[in-house]
Image (cartoon, helix red, strand yellow):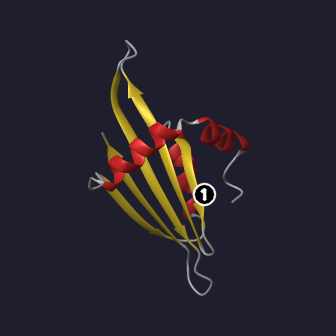
C-alpha cells in the first residue's frame, strides 16, 4: 500500500506492544463513536490524509488478499500537557474489481 510511508512504518515498529494490545482491547470492547462507509476508488487515500491531519499515527497494519486493515492512534493534550482524550481509528479498505472500492472508518474516543 503506497499510502503508508516510511515514517508510518517506523512509528508502527517503535510503538509499544503492550499499549497497542490495550488500545485494540478497548476497541473490541466498545462501540465506535463515529462510523463512515465510503464508496469510491480514491476514498482510502483521502481517509489516510484526514487521519494524519487529525494527528493520528499508524500503530497496526494487516494486509489481506483483497483488503487492508489499519489502526491509527493519537492523544489530545491540554495546554499543560495533560492527556484529555485518546482517539483510535480503524480503517478497512476493501478492493472490489467489478465495483468501486469500499473504505470503512470507525473512531473511538477513550
Q: Which residue is mark 1?
A: 45
Q: State which quadrant residue 67 falls in.
A: bottom right
Q: Residue at x 47, y 38 (%)?
A: 18
Indicate whether 37 appears above or below 99: above
Indicate whether 13 appears above or below 70: above
Nearest the viewer among 78 and 19 is 19
Indicate left or right for 21 with 96 as reference: left
- Identify the residue at the far front of this view: 18
- Identify the residue at the far top of this view: 80
Q: Residue at x 26, y 56 (%)?
A: 31
How many numbered marks appear?
A: 1
Q: State which quadrant residue 77 falls in.
A: top left
Residue 65: x %, y % from top left = 63, 74
Indicate whether 63 appears above or below 26: below
Residue 97: x %, y % from top left = 62, 83
Q: Residue at x 37, y 12 (%)?
A: 80
Residue 14: x %, y % from top left = 62, 35
Quarter of the image with the N terminus in it:
bottom right
Q: Residue at x 64, y 41 (%)?
A: 13
Q: Residues within 10 Å of mark 1 (few under 14, many from 20)?
A: some
Residue 101: x %, y % from top left = 55, 74
Q: Secondary structure at mark 1?
A: helix
Indicate whether 57 appears above or below 41: above
Quarter of the image with the C terminus in it:
top left
Amino acid at each position: 500500500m503506497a499510502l503508508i510511508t516510511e515514517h508510518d512504518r517506523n512509528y508502527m515498529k517503535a510503538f509499544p506492544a503492550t499499549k497497542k494490545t490495550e488500545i485494540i482491547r478497548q476497541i473490541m470492547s466498545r462501540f465506535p463513536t463515529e462510523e463512515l462507509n465510503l464508496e469510491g476508488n480514491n476514498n482510502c487515500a483521502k481517509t489516510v490524509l484526514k487521519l494524519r491531519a487529525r494527528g493520528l499515527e499508524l500503530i497496526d497494519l494487516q494486509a489481506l488478499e483483497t483488503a487492508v486493515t489499519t489502526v491509527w492512534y493519537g492523544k489530545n493534550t491540554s495546554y499543560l500537557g495533560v492527556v484529555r482524550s485518546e482517539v483510535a481509528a480503524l480503517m478497512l479498505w476493501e478492493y472490489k474489481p467489478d465495483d468501486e472500492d469500499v473504505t470503512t472508518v470507525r473512531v473511538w474516543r477513550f
